[in-house]
């Protein structure tokens, strides 16, 4: 729908909108249309966007139906924040990073358990996402590079989540993040995703999916 057509639809509802509201409604509609067009392949789009390459790997076969469905849902969450990761702005990187990690954790778990036929040691009584990254780091080679990259992203995600800081007098306050800080973190996160997923692509090619 063209912007002018969207404007007419909104006006027909007899609701007062600002120019910013018109633009928001239009962009939301365009984004939804783009996502719906690839609704079953959001994970392919996200993977290609982050590695800046086209892929012919069969992720459905690699992940299996349940893992694929889960990864695709998290990938869709990422696309709803920004269809292309380079367009993420400010604090939007927080939710995007969380969803992206969960999307690709499924790849790592599936690779280790199904194809390497190994179990991931627990460092605590319960399981933690970081167990996966530590396991890969110890393996060396491409697996080491993947583990390091994802561990770095995981730590950055935790920085976003743990915002309480304590002053010298014991008083706590919330840490404030500026858009500049968020955008700097975004560049770091995207760089590590590109590195980690590129090495993962090498491993997947060796599996001959």
Image (tube, grey):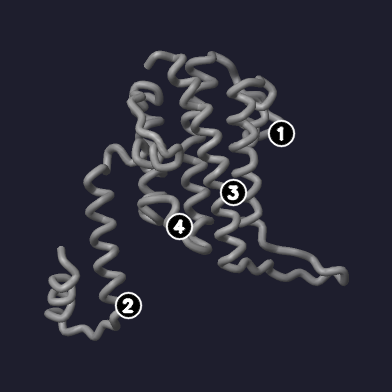
Relative to the observer, which residue lies in front, 139 or 51?
51
Find residue 145 and report its horizontal and vertical position in percent: 61, 29
Specify which label sits upstream in the sequence, 2 or 1.
Answer: 2
Quadrant of residue 15 within the rendered picture: bottom left
- Camera-side residue of 120 and 31: 31
Q: Could you tell me how far apart the alpha carbons at marks 4 and 1 are, in whole angstroms?
A: 34 Å
Secondary structure under the numbered disc 2 in the rendered image: helix
Give me the disc on residue 124.
1
- Cα separation, mark 3 vs mark 4, equals 13 Å
Which numbered disc, 4 or 1, marks the residue closer to the eye? 4
Ranked by sequence position, the earlier of labels 3 and 4 is: 4
Residue position for label 3: 188
The crowding category of the residue bearing disc 1, from other C-alpha atoms within 10 Å (few below 14, some 14 to 19, many at least 20), is: few
* Cα distance in 3D space between marks 3 and 2: 31 Å
Residue linked to disc 2: 20
Q: Quadrant of the N terminus?
A: bottom left
Question: Disc 2 or disc 1, which is closer to the eye?
Answer: 2
> In the rendered image, which quarter contains the C terminus?
top left
Q: Is residue 75 visible?
A: yes
Between circles 3 and 1, the one closer to the viewer is 3
């Amino acid at each position: 729908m063209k912007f002018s057509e969207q404007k007419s639809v909104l006006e027909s509802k007899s609701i007062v909108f600002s120019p910013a509201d018109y633009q928001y409604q239009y962009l939301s509609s365009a984004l939804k249309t783009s996502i719906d067009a690839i609704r079953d392949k959001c994970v392919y789009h996200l993977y290609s966007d982050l590695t800046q390459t086209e892929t012919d790997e069969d992720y459905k076969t690699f992940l299996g139906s349940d893992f694929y469905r889960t990864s695709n849902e998290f990938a869709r969450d990422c696309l709803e924040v920004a269809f292309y990761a380079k367009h993420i702005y400010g604090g939007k990187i927080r939710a995007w990073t969380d969803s992206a990690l969960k999307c690709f954790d499924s790849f790592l778990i599936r690779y280790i358990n199904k194809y390497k036929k190994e179990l991931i040691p627990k460092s605590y009584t319960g399981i933690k996402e970081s167990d996966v990254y530590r396991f890969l780091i110890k393996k060396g080679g491409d697996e080491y590079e993947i583990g390091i990259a994802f561990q770095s992203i995981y730590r950055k995600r935790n920085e976003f989540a743990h915002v309480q800081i304590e002053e010298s007098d014991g008083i706590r306050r919330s840490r404030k993040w500026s858009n500049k800080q968020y955008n700097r973190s975004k560049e770091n996160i995207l760089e590590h995703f590109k590195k980690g997923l590129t090495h993962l692509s090498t491993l997947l090619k060796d599996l001959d999916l």
